Amino acid sequence: MSATETPSRSELTPLDWAFLCMEHEDTPMHVGAVAVFRSDGPVDRDRLRRVLAERAQRIARLRMRLERSWLQPHWREARDFDAAEHVYDHEIPAPGGREELAILASELIADPLDQRRPLWELHLITGLADNRFAVLMKFHHSLVDGHDAVEVGVRLLDEFTDLTDTPATPPPNPLDEAFGLIRRPEKLVGALRGTLSKSSESLGIAASVMRNMRVPAQSSPMHASTSPARRLALVPIDLADVRRIRSRHGGGTNNDVVLAVIAGALRIWMAARGEDSAEVPVRALIPVCRRRSNQPRSGNNQLSGYLCELPVDEPDPATRLASIRAEMSGNKSAGPLRGPGAFPVLAGRLPQVLHHVATPLVAQGAPLLFDTMVTNVPLPTFHAALDGAEVAELFPLAPLASGHSLSIAVSQFRGTVHIGVQANRAALPDLEKLAEALPQAVAELSDGT
């Protein structure tokens, strides 16, 4: 299939639809990223906007518009689609830095996407110092998960514009499936076993979710009344420091170290606010992508998750890391289809019609199960440029759940761990103190025994 061909229609899975049902004007459900580029000369805004629009026009998924239905919502290619209508440009007073970029990006990320149009936007931001510019990408979570967002973003870059689209999987015909099972009894037996196995898994996940619900501490700064206003912090950490900490403290993964850094930063930040960290438990949801690289596409989101207690009450940084490493190791041993963090799997098995009623109510209960989300977005290692300008930084952004004060997204790119923090501005007016605490937490782990 060429880059300009696409099926006219493709399905939404129940989990894709759930992300749409969670949406409220105060809790937009889009994922995003802020990519910063380093140009050799003055930035040509008009040319960059044209380049982005021309490349987006060729990406089939970006041409798809939502068509709602109680029975089978689906994507259909938008008529007279013009990608240029989704590409905007902004200029901050020069010479802008990371703080000025974060301020503008926080205003742009707060706005919900228009569900009458294809659910994405690109925002070109110029005025940064040293001939730099940025692109803020926004994709609705129903359209992409973190893995897909990377795939789409990569196809906007110079080296990857000739990649072809992956055909969307058409909705299966239930009658064809039924007759196929009747004609081959062994398939019918296998289908029944699979259904029973999934039913058992679903009951186990539901029971685990119920057992792990708890009322969050009333004084916790991790929870607040939902507000449309946002603040962003964009924090880089040297990947070499993360690897050095991992080696010094007995292994584990880079993600274990990053989680320990976040726990340490939350502890430092709470102390600066006069909060008693012993009275503020912090449980993080760690999303997990279940799609394999060679797996045929069926819908956009194939997610599960783990829950991990971040030991913000532990004064010793080495003990915090050891605790997180042990808990994450246990989560991985159990697998992504067990435990309360697997509730996205459960959502993906519910009929779409139930999501209309149940999902908006369930979304309000997110604080009963976890206090923040920390997602790690894997990025490939490659040379990356846009119209000849090299990618210098890439900060991912995760949606902010109802009733939560902050969400955290992490990516490793070219020797740096990029941390994007999205916060409820009304609840966290001091987000800069949390941003400052992240490198302090790295130093704590580097210095600790």
Image: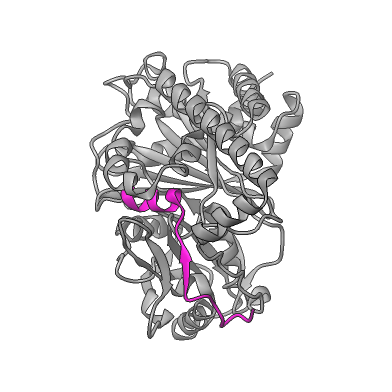
Q: Within the image, what quadrant is residue 210 found in?
A: top left
The answer to whether residue 62 shows anywhere in this view is yes
In this rendering, does residue 122 appear at all?
no
Q: Residue at x 50, y 76 (%)?
A: 56
Q: Nearer the viewer, residue 403 or 332?
A: 332
132 lies above or below 180: below
> Residue at left 58%, top 54%?
147
Q: Position of residue 255 (x, y in %)?
A: 63, 36
The quadrant of the image that shows the N terminus is bottom right
Q: Is residue 159 left or right of residue 64?
A: right
Q: Nearer the viewer, residue 97 or 197?
A: 197
Name above or below for residue 134 compared with residue 200. below
The quadrant of the rendering that contains the C terminus is top right
Q: Is 17 in the magenta?
A: yes
**Residue positioned 60% across, 24% down in the render:** 324
Q: Is residue 68 above or below residue 443?
A: below
Q: Is residue 20 magenta?
A: yes
Determine whether, in the image, residue 272 is placed left or right of residue 396.
Answer: left
- Percent across and percent down for residue 101 are 41, 60
Q: Which residues are magenta?
A: 1-22
191, 359: nearer the viewer: 191
Residue found at x 60% / y 19%: 323
Task: Give whichever of 184, 414 is nearer the camera.
Answer: 184
Q: Position of residue 89 (x, y in %)?
A: 38, 75
| 290 vs 318: above or below | below
Query: How many numbered marks appear?
Result: 0
Q: How is the image coloured?
A: one colour
